Image (cartoon, rainbow, N blue to C red):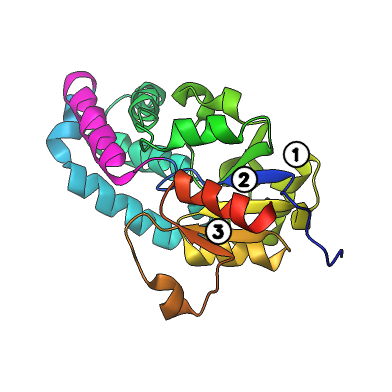
Amino acid sequence: MPTNRPAWPKAILFDLDDTLWPIAPVILQAEETLFAWLREHAPRVAQQFTIDGLRQARLELLARRPEFQLDLGKLRRAGLLDAFEAAGEDAAKVELAMAEFFAARNAVVPYDDVLPGLLRLKGRVLLGAITNGNADLRTIGLEHHFKAWVSAPQLGVAKPDPAIFLAGCKALDVAPWDAVYVGDDVLLDVQGAQAVGMRGVWMNRNGSHKHLEHGVEPDAIVGNFDELLDWLKREHA
């Protein structure tokens, strides 16, 4: 492995949820949207279950079948199938329900710094994404900013597994040591990337000190894209 870093990384890869946009409010809204759809199109499910009840059932299903952790969309689909069966609803409607959910799940709003930051990086480095989630950059409308993106549902492995980071680098045709990975989770993102030789940057938007708790030393800690760009210019000029 080369010991000298390039003056500027060849590629920067990003986590998606909670790095490029907040996800918790989006999921909550998507579940509300899905339940409203159930009230209209699968009323027996809506009468027998609540949003919290469906969520608890998914958690219990995940405990029994941990392989669903690799694809939470499949987990939600399986949970709905169980609920439809229990309520005596037509299971053929589940795919329509999932389409409703995914449309709302991908109605994300990037943080204000993201689009200007991507535009400033574009053309200078290759841009990619690695995610454990099921965000769809095509549906979201950001696909054109990225040369490639890989996901846990697609690959069947999830961060911090080295295979997903290596797949991201391969998709961009760069060596790990020529790439930087940026994410909000110090263990899944930073430590996972560093384990394969990438530089791991922690996108710490809320001033957390979790890296100290876990003993992780990110190559950089940034609060937004402006700070990421400042670090790149300062350290790799």
How many discs appear? 3
Give the side of residue 48 with respect to residue 20, left or right: left
Task: Write the residue at 54% across / 29% down.
Answer: 119
102 over 204 or under it: above or below: above
x and y percent of residue 162 in the render?
69, 60
Residue 112: mark? none
Residues drawn in magenta = 21-41
Nearer to us of marks 3 and 1 is 3
Residue 176 image position (x, y, % from top left)? 76, 55
> Alpha carbon of mark 1 to alpha carbon of mark 2: how far?
9 Å
Q: Taken as a whole, is the magenta stretch helix, strand or loop?
A: helix
Q: Residue at x 36, y 38 (%)?
A: 111
The residue drawn where x is 50% and y is 36% is: 117
Q: Would you place residue 45 above or below residue 60 in this image?
A: above
Amino acid at pointer 2: Leu
* Left or right side of 53 for 70: right
Compare marks 3 and 1 and give the one earlier in the sequence: 1
| Residue 67: percent from left, percent from top | 53, 55
Q: Which element type, helix, strand or loop, lies under badge 3?
A: strand
Q: Is residue 27 magenta?
A: yes
Q: Nearer the viewer, residue 74 or 202?
A: 202
Q: Is 137 covered by the magenta stretch?
A: no
Could you tell me if the residues under marks 1 and 2 are in contact, i.e. CB atoms within 8 Å? yes
Left-right relation of 155 to 81 = right
Q: Residues within 10 Å of mark 3 (few under 14, many from 20)?
A: many
Q: x and y percent of residue 207 in the render? A: 33, 63
Pointers 3 and 1 in contact (C-beta within 8 Å): no
Residue linked to disc 1: 172
Q: From the viewer's perspective, is the residue at label 2 or at label 3 nearer?
A: 3
Q: CA distance from mark 3 to mark 1?
A: 18 Å
Mark 2 = which residue? 13
Q: Which residue is mark 3?
A: 201
